[in-house]
Amino acid sequence: MGFDPREFIQRLRETNPEIRDACPETFEAYVRFHEQALTAGQVDARTKELAALAVSVYSKCPYCVPYHVQRALAMGITREEMIEIGMVAASVGGGATMTYVSMMVQAINELTNIDASPESL
């Protein structure tokens, strides 16, 4: 079974409504927190998205990596910037994290040239 970033993103889209239905207040509070955390403040939104991508790679989250790659692409963040931030994560996380840099590159390759608009996330 290979890594398909579109499949991971689709799984999130399919299961999030179930989570929202089970715990609507908590789910909506999390969504608001997530959106606010990534909104420009003292740190611009682009830098925050790169930080979120680095944390996703470092945390080895197979759902987070393609999600944040797609968001980064929608913001115009380049492949090179994403790979560089992935290498920052690998410098802290070591070899196991490096495998997720590879996963991130695959997600970039797969998700480039598809609809990366915020509405599709």
Image (tube, rainbow, N blue to C red):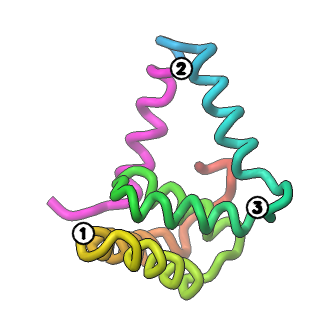
Mark 2 crowdedness (10 Å alpha carbons): few <14, some 14-19, many ≥20: some
Q: Which residue lies furthest to the bottom in this view?
A: 80
Assess whether residue 79 is covered by the magenta stretch: no
SS at badge 3: helix
Q: Which residues, given as a range, are shown in magenta?
A: 1-19
Which quarter of the picture shows residue 5? bottom left
Mark 3 crowdedness (10 Å alpha carbons): few <14, some 14-19, many ≥20: some
SS at badge 2: helix
Q: What residue type is labelled 1?
A: Ala
Residue 88 horizontal side relative to residue 44, left or right: left
* Distance of label 1 from label 3 (alpha carbons): 28 Å
Q: Which of marks 1 and 3 is nearer the N terminus?
A: 3
Assess whether residue 3 is covered by the magenta stretch: yes
- Of 81 and 5, the residue lying toward us: 81
* Distance of label 1 from label 2 (alpha carbons): 33 Å
Residue 37 marker: none
Which quarter of the picture shows residue 51? bottom right
**Where 119 sits versus 52, above or below?**
above
- Residue 8 place in picture, x, y as percent: 37, 50
- Residue 75 place in picture, x, y as percent: 71, 68
Residue 63 horizontal side relative to residue 72, left or right: left
Q: What residue type is labelled 3?
A: Ala
SS at badge 1: helix
> Which residue is identified by label 3?
45
The residue shown at (40%, 63%) is: 58
> Which residue is identified by label 2?
20
Quadrant assignment for the N terminus: bottom left
The residue shown at (52%, 13%) is: 23
> Which residue is identified by label 1?
96
- Do labels 2 and 3 touch, CB within 8 Å? no
Q: Main secondary structure of the magenta part?
A: helix
